[in-house]
Amino acid sequence: VQLVESGGGLVQPGGSLRLSCVASGFTFSNYRMSWYRQAPGKERELVAAILDNGIPAYYADAVKGRFSIARDNAKRTVYLQMNDLTPDDTAVYYCFRPINYWGEGTQVTVRS
């Protein structure tokens, strides 16, 4: 199993980013996928999750209405569209597949 995230970077408050996670080594369309994040000095937290059929299953309260999770099973990719970013969204964002498979993460920094 391999999960490779991309799309992070430095963005100003109010800006947008789209993260991607390309999966390999398993039947992607059979698995719920999730995005987590970990800010400096804080625990890793679940941000969003999506079912195998493409229906979003969960958004953290802090991101509802701003973030959107999606997937393309043909491309073996899960996305996280992040809009109206704030400094509180600064974190390393990780792709996750049950039971315990993680990507290496992509850094998102929001500052003026």
Image (spheres, helix red, strand yellow):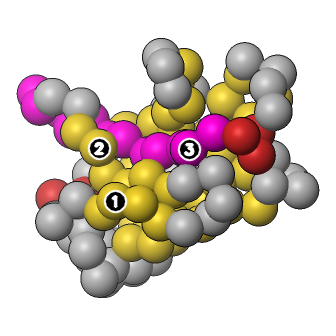
Residue 90, image x, y percentages: 27, 51
Q: Marks 2 and 1, how far apart in space?
A: 9 Å
**Mark 3 sits on what residue?**
32
Q: Is residue 100 above or below residue 36?
A: above
Q: Which residues are magenta?
A: 31-42
| Viewer-proximal residue among 11 and 57 | 57
Q: Is residue 35 above or below residue 19?
A: above
Kindly indicate whether the residue at mark 3 contacts the one at mark 2 (C-beta within 8 angstroms).
no
Q: Is residue 73 magenta?
A: no
Name the residue at 24% across, 31% down: 44
Residue type (three-letter) at the residue carrying disc 2: Leu
Q: Is residue 104 visible?
A: no
Kindly indicate whether the residue at mark 1 contacts the one at mark 2 (C-beta within 8 angstroms).
yes
The extreme left residue here reads 41
Label 2: which secondary element = strand
**Mark 2 sits on what residue?**
46
Horizontal side, residue 1 vs residue 65: left or right: right
Label 1: which secondary element = strand
The extreme right residue here reads 74
Closer mark to the observer between disc 2 and disc 3: 3
Residue type (three-letter) at the residue carrying disc 1: Tyr
In the rendered structure, find residue 58 and report the number of the disc placed on it: 1
Q: Is residue 25 above or below residue 28?
A: above
Q: Marks 2 and 3, how far apart in space?
A: 13 Å
Horizontal side, residue 79 vs residue 72: left or right: left
Name the residue at 29% across, 82% down: 65
